[in-house]
Image (cartoon, grey):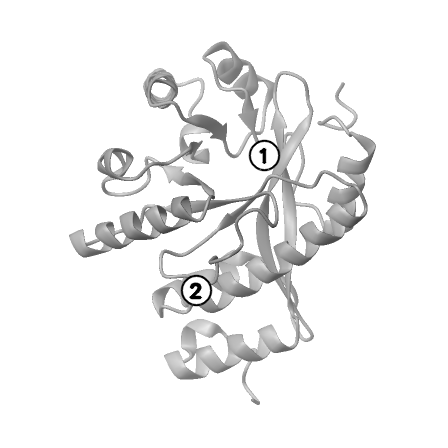
Amino acid sequence: MGNRYENLQDMGKEEMRLTVSEAVRNREYQVWYQPQVDMGTGEIFGAEALVRWRHPQKGLLLPGNFIPALEKNGLMPLLDREVLRIVRRDAGEAKKAGIPAGPISVNLSTFCAGTKGLAGEEDLLFEITETAKEEEENREIWRFAKQLREEGFRIAMDDYGMGRSTLKMLCQVPFDILKLDRYFISRIGEEKGETILKSTIALAKDLGMEIVAEGLESREQIAFLLRHGCRLGQGYYYARPLEKDRYFQFRAEGKRLPEGRR
């Protein structure tokens, strides 16, 4: 396809589908891993899988350059399945080498197929973002989450507080983990932001959920979260997303983060 590397936003749905399918066949997508850390000890306890697109003309593309177009056209399941394939491959390699790579959290669209029969193969958990605009979409999220739980997976609510009906979703869906969005983490130091975070952490604890903070950038943020009962987090303060081999090296060495700050 002569224009397969033009802006995806300018393509029709079918042309975009062919472009993404070709990129999958050519193994152009990569998964990088952002370490998730026990903020009290600096120990890495897992990672979030984050997709990158390394194509031959434009180099390494971050998700913001292609994810929105795929979401808009309902094509995320194509990418989800490829990311899941790569994570399974990488986790299998780590297991053979005796490296504790997981748990690895993978973002899935609510209409992604392909998890059937994976339970127990790798230490995976799945993140679901509440983006529903209609009641039927809410019901789809519930059915999808129920399917994942029946298959033995743990599930996390990603981007908590950024959707239209997150409290309702907490009532309906049996989430195991709540991820505090970077928007709220960035407001530590502001009275309203801190009040919301303290209340959210208390709510998650009362519901028996683990809590993971996203977008950590400072010691002050980490100190606040630890004071109020959130121990797990990820962000540039600890590490940017790492290529597979570097992440595996960190886990094999028992690396504590952040590097050079302890």
Q: Which mark, by number, is residue 156?
A: none
- Would you say 193 lies left or right of 248 here? left
Determine which residue is flagged by label 1: 235
Please tell me whether residue 75 is drawn above or below residue 16 in the rendered image: above
Badge 1 or badge 2: first in the primary sequence: 2
| Residue 8 in picture, x, y percent from top left | 47, 73
| Residue 46 in picture, x, y percent from top left | 63, 36
Residue placed farthest to the top in the image?
Answer: 227
**What SS does tag 2 mark?**
helix
| Residue 6 in picture, x, y percent from top left | 53, 78
Residue shown at 42%/25% (left/top)?
187
Q: Nearer the viewer, residue 119 or 103?
A: 119
Tell me the kind of residue under disc 1: Gly
Tell me the quadrant of the picture where the C terminus can be found: top right
| Quarter of the figure with residue 9 | bottom left
How packed is label 2: few (under 14 Cα within 10 Å), some, or many (20 or more)?
Answer: many
**What SS does tag 1 mark?**
loop
Determine which residue is flagged by label 2: 76
Please tell me whether residue 191 is drawn above or below residue 44 in the rendered image: above
Residue shown at 48%/69% (left/top)?
78
Q: Are marks 1 and 2 in contact (CB under 8 Å)?
A: no
Instruction: Indicate which label's residue lies in the foreground, 1 or 2.
Output: 2
